[in-house]
Image: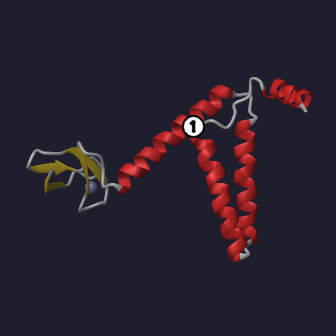
Amino acid sequence: MSNWRERFARWFQGRYGANDTLNKWLLGAFLVILVLALLLQSNLLNLLSVLVLAYAYFRIFSRNIEKRTAENRKFLEIKSSVLSFFRGGDRTHRVFSCPNCGQKVRVPRGHGKISITCPKCHTEFVKRS
Ligand SMILES: [Zn+2]
């Protein structure tokens, strides 16, 4: 048994491993999708869960540590911007939509009523920051 473990440890050396946020989320997503697939009897979700798991395993056993680290960093960036979107922006900035074209404009908070010029269509509109 210890021999088997030693061999596995040697084989696993230099590989990326499961200790990053993206892999934890992938494995979590796999479980959620799998449960949904079973509940809804959906072949599509079943396939999706297999793909998510395959991607997680691919990352765990990958030797390209640099690339996996970059992936995880990208994932963390996306995650934090999604989270701040659901919290209604961060504490230092507010996001407004241009009334003309819908372009999102980010402005610093706490400057009272300000006039904002849309970077896309150059429409001016006044908002309270
Ligand atoms: Zn605009």
Label 1 lies in ligand 1 vicinity (Cβ under 8 Å): no
Q: Residue at x 70, y 28 (%)?
A: 64
Which quarter shows the N terminus? top right
Residue toward you, 113 or 64? 64
Dividing the image into four quarters, tell me where ligand 1 lies. Answer: bottom left
The amino acid at mark 1 is Asn
Identify the residue position indicated by label 1 in the image. 72
Give the image location of residue 51, x and y in percent: 73, 54
Q: Quadrant of residue 57?
A: top right
Give the image location of residue 112, x and y in percent: 8, 49
Q: Residues within 10 Å of mark 1 (few under 14, many from 20)?
A: some
Q: Is residue 15 above or below residue 72?
A: above
Q: Quadrant of residue 12?
A: top right
**Colouring used for the render:** secondary structure
Residue toward you, 37 or 127? 37
Side of 64 where 4 appears, left or right: right
Q: Is residue 66 above or below residue 39?
A: above
Side of 20 where 115 appears, left or right: left
Q: Residue at x 76, y 35 (%)?
A: 61
Q: How many marks?
A: 1
Residue toward you, 116 or 62? 62
Q: Is residue 8 above or below residue 110?
A: above
Give the image location of residue 48, x and y in percent: 71, 60
Give the image location of residue 89, x and y in percent: 30, 50
Residue toward you, 86 or 94? 86
Q: Residue at x 63, y 35 (%)?
A: 19
Residue lying farthest to the front in this orientation = 1
Residue lying farthest to the left in this orientation = 112
Residue lying farthest to the bottom in this orientation = 40
Side of 3 where 55 appears, left or right: left
Under circle 1, the secondary element is helix
Q: Residue at x 57, y 37 (%)?
A: 72
